[in-house]
Amino acid sequence: MPSSQVAVLGECVADAFVTNPLTPRDERDGDPGGTGGGAGRDPDGPDGLDGAGGAGGAGAGAAPDGPGGELLLRVLPGGGPANTAVALARLGTATRFLGRLSGDTFGALFRAHLTASGVDLTGCVGAAEPSTLAVATLDSGGRARYSFHADGSADWGWSTAELTAARIGDVACLHTGSLALVRAPGAEAVEEALSATAARATISIDPNVRAALVDPAVYRERMPRWCAVADMIRLSDEDLEHIRPGEPVERVCDAWHEAGVRLVVVTRGPLGALVSVDGERACVPAPPTRVVDTVGAGDSFTAGLLHRLRTGGLLGGRLDRLDLERAADAAAFAARVAALTCSAPGADPPWARDLDGSDPR
């Protein structure tokens, strides 16, 4: 029987969120652990942690003592590919994560979070380098802006000797994206793995542009060759503006179809998503949602899309049997998954049970 497993290749990132304003010490309200407020979707979840994103309360950062006060940080497991792997597994898709996981405190956090969500970690590499840290600031709309501490970290060290066909395994789909595709020295090995796997599995890419860390021109230059190997690309309207600024979305989709990719999905936040299959297009609305924050929403959308395509028997090849109707159906399901993610703090995607009669408001 053909495999139905999805492999997700990429980074885990420790997302550190500010949980309080910069407050003088004598005005603090007594949260010495820096764990902040807010509960996740499943406070008694299987990982035995505090339930915020499946693994909250991992640490706190503080400014030095003095009149400037203290800044509290709440550290949650994140990183676009890891978020996608967690969301896929929670939806019920057998998911194999391929990551280079550090032996530091954050690496332990990642392992606990991924394992508790049902992700297979047997394809991971134990890395001597430290984990990547991102400090996230939320704007008034719940969108995160990140500053990264990524130089020399574990995620980017892939070699061709590590990233073999045996490590990837017998999978129906290989998904990757974000910084793993563009950060040296491992990006070249990741691209080689995509090309080698395309002959036997569906290839999915989410560019997830980090303009503060990587010049958007890098994504612009590499997109044609990613489209040549990928069967599906999902990106946000913000990503699109970084890669092809000022161009109509339809023109960009058509250029990428011509380069080789069959399915392009552009997510547009509360405006829903544009779905393009070989130049045929449909718009899918976003469910009404009370947004806590949008952290991990795009990653959850990608997971929902892949999950629905898998349950429809469409993964495992070049998406030859995919038509616009089925692509739009998958995107509508993915929008529900993303909406539920927005309704909880941090990258805390829903479990399959949460979608039964779900109302994300």
Image (cartoon, grey):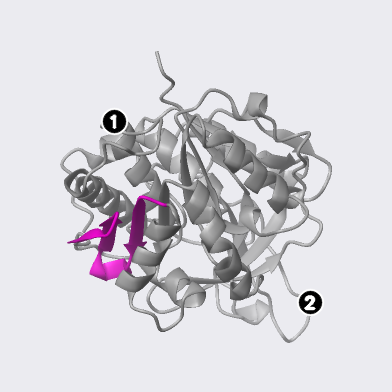
Query: Is residue 180 magenta-colored?
Result: no
Amino acid type of the residue that numbered disc 2 sits on in the rendered structure: Asp
The residue identified by callout 1 is 311
In percent of the image, x 54 and y 68: which residue is there?
Answer: 19
Query: Of callouts 1 and 2, which one flags the residue occurring earlier in the amino acid sequence?
Result: 2
213 relative position to 337: left or right: right
Q: Quadrant of residue 306?
A: top left
Does residue 22 sit above or below 163 in this rendering? below
- List the single residue furthest toward the front: 258
Q: Are marks 1 and 2 in contact (CB under 8 Å)?
A: no
In front of the other: label 1 or label 2?
1
21 relative position to 154: left or right: left
For the N terminus, the image quarter is top left
| Disc on res. 65 | 2
Q: Nearer the viewer, residue 64 or 147?
A: 147
Q: Residues within 10 Å of mark 2 (few under 14, many from 20)?
A: few
For the C terminus, the image quarter is bottom left
In percent of the image, x 66 and y 43: which residue is there?
Answer: 192
Q: Position of residue 132 (x, y in %)?
A: 70, 56
- List the single residue furthest toward the bottom: 67
Q: Residues within 10 Å of mark 1 (few under 14, many from 20)?
A: few
Is the stretch drawn in magenta largely helix, strand or loop? strand
Residue segment shown in magenta: 261-283
Q: Nearer the viewer, residue 244 or 112?
A: 244
| Disc on res. 60 | none
Amino acid type of the residue that numbered disc 1 sits on in the rendered structure: Thr
Does residue 285 sit above or below 356 in this rendering? below
162 relative position to 276: left or right: right
Q: Quadrant of residue 59?
A: bottom right
